[in-house]
Amino acid sequence: MKLVVQIFLIIFNITSLSTLAQNKVSLKSPDGKITFSFVLDKKYPSYAVDYKGKQLIKQSELSLDFKEGGRFAADLVLLKPLRSKVEEDYVLPVGKASKIHSRYNQLILPLREKSKTGRQINLVVRLFDDGLAFRYEFPKQQNWSAYSLLEECSTFNLIGNPKVNTLLFGQDYNSSHEGLYHKTTLDKVLENNLMDLPALFEYPGQVFVAITEASLRNYSGMYLVKRQGILSSQLTPLPSDTEVMVKATLPHHTPWRVIMIGDRAGSFLESNLLTNLNEPTKFKDVSWLKPGKTSFHWWNGDVVPDSTFAPGVNFETNKYYIDFCARNNIEYHSVIGYGGFPWYPANGPSYAEQGTYSDVTKTVASLDMQRICDYAKSKGVAIHVWINWKALYPQLEAAFTQFEKWGIKGMMVDFLDRSDQEMVKIQEEILERAAAHHLFIQFHGAFKPTGLNRTFPNEFTREGTYNYEQNKWLPKAVSPDHDLDIAFVRMIAGASDYHLGGFRAVTPEKFKPKYIRPNMVGTRSHMLAMYVVLESYLNMVADYPQAYEGEPGFEFLQKVPTVWDETKVLGAEIDKYLSIARKHKEEWYIGAINSSTAREVKIPLDFLDKATYTAEIFMDANDAEEQPNHLIKTKKEVINGTVLTVKLAAGGGCAIRLYKNDKGK
């Protein structure tokens, strides 16, 4: 991994504190469109944000309240600020882009109390062309060695009354971060309701703002709450001491508080701002990282319809799916369990409930993990396992040592359901120790991504999304409209696992929940497109083999990759449709997903190079609204400048593979 950093330091020539006129400092983004204005008065520090000369965020308080020493807000002194310009090139071995150029302007504002204790906190601000971020840094100091944080008061005083698209959780900190999105205006959001991140705001005139966080490490996960009309940070309390949010020793720093700004719907999905704000990986070797698609038979109900053996936690059931993966270019098979009971010994009543005993270094008597791994390897398929985090964590090193010995390549770690500081540290420990054994991680029931896949590229995906698993038990299916919400809002933060691959769609009025062989609402072309639209480096192919083989459109799933060199949003209207192009090596893939209203969209191909391409197009059939599994496959020769016109059915979609003519199929 090559890292090039150019830093130009311009230190203010200040001979006395009094020369800082009224304690006001400002910083602009490299393109000059975003302005961050800082003010220090007697009550507290505050900031404001302008975009293209118009204010988006009014003066907003920044303060911290500590158990020892009280609030850090009033009677502060601004010491000598430090400005810098930074340009950086880095590579993501796993991501939506492979080579990234980052540039930002930085301002460090040292703030010190006038009291005898003289605690110092540095406010660090970075402005990029597509947004800004700030964090609090606690340098090592003589009279302050540790802290217990009661409250972080980072406020976001949004001007006017923008539209809001977010998840609201009441007062429940312990959640899987899954739900249906609330679409309202800021004035209608109830006070003190937990607003999950990322949250998307839309101003009149096509100006969009997203608030989230980056580089969440050894700190508490952040929500937003509205207090007296102003959005403020709300941290998740420690389970062992609910008065305290964070305990740390100095030096220390908070995560980045991120404000993304743009004037194009969907532009945040192209942004690399969150990975820009994370530390480079320390992995010396990344060649073992192999993103790909995986089977996941729990979703389909553990179906093995054409077998002569009894399905269960055994070699034969897993062989059935391994053979399917081998035939169809699916890189991983997931070993889960059967009928709600895991592959490892445990006395809990279900996957979710841990019980009093478990041992993930062993298998149940009916299963031989070594035999499964050896057989899968002989077929060119790798093994990925499901595991409850409460079973894994007490045996972390022993488990990872055994997994590596067996030949397992990664795992889904499930039912985390927390975002407090302890859980944040647990997840990082899992990632770090897993990497030492060449294991990738897929978190389920987890908080949103924060760009940490730059530091730990063995984090392949996260759930934290209300997704197609709900079709197994809820009376109303996950809708194509909700798919758009996930793409426009949750995906701002990064990879999103979604139980993709259901190949049996019905019309909304015919939908009924089915735990075995669940159905979908939305067309098959919509499902194909989701493999491109959604960012996830371990997409599931979650239905059973007979649902796929010989079915129209499955050839697209056989070829579509899960990691990308470039990402471009081609067309986007929130709540209506989204089309995204992603490049993998010399091929481009396009996915367009539609809401529940039919429409015609244009897909410009002006991103292509000068070569001639073949477009392999999977689109809704004319009767797709009545027969959602019907699609049309066509091929067309295209070049840079070609504009494709596509009719999207209600709940429909379009998936396209573009390959150069001289490369063949």
Image (tube, rainbow, N blue to C red):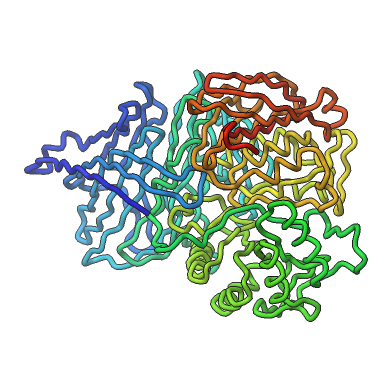
Q: Is residue 487 above or below residue 400?
A: above
Is residue 177 visible in the rendered image? The answer is no
> In terms of depth relative to the viewer, which is nearer, 338 or 49?
338
Is residue 254 visible in the rendered image? The answer is yes
> In terms of depth relative to the viewer, which is nearer, 182 or 382?
382
Residue 277, image x and y in percent? 39, 47
Which residue corresponds to the image point at 58% horizontal and 28% vertical from the top-left? Answer: 613
Residue 466, image x and y in percent? 69, 46
> In terms of depth relative to the viewer, which is nearer, 69 or 287?
287
Q: Farthest residue toward the left?
A: 15
Which residue corresponds to the image point at 47% horizontal and 62% vertical from the top-left? Answer: 244
Residue 148, image x and y in percent? 40, 63
244 vs 552, left or right, is left
481 vs 42, left or right, is right
Please tell me in which quadrant of the rendered image residue 351 appears: bottom right
Q: Farthest residue toward the front?
A: 662
Which residue corresponds to the image point at 36% horizontal and 48% vertical from the top-left? Answer: 135
Locate the N terminus and report the quarter of the image it occupies: bottom left
Residue 628, image x and y in percent? 83, 32
Locate the C terminus and report the quarter of the image it occupies: top right
- Disc count in the image? 0
Which residue corresponds to the image point at 30% horizontal and 58% vertical from the top-left? Answer: 138
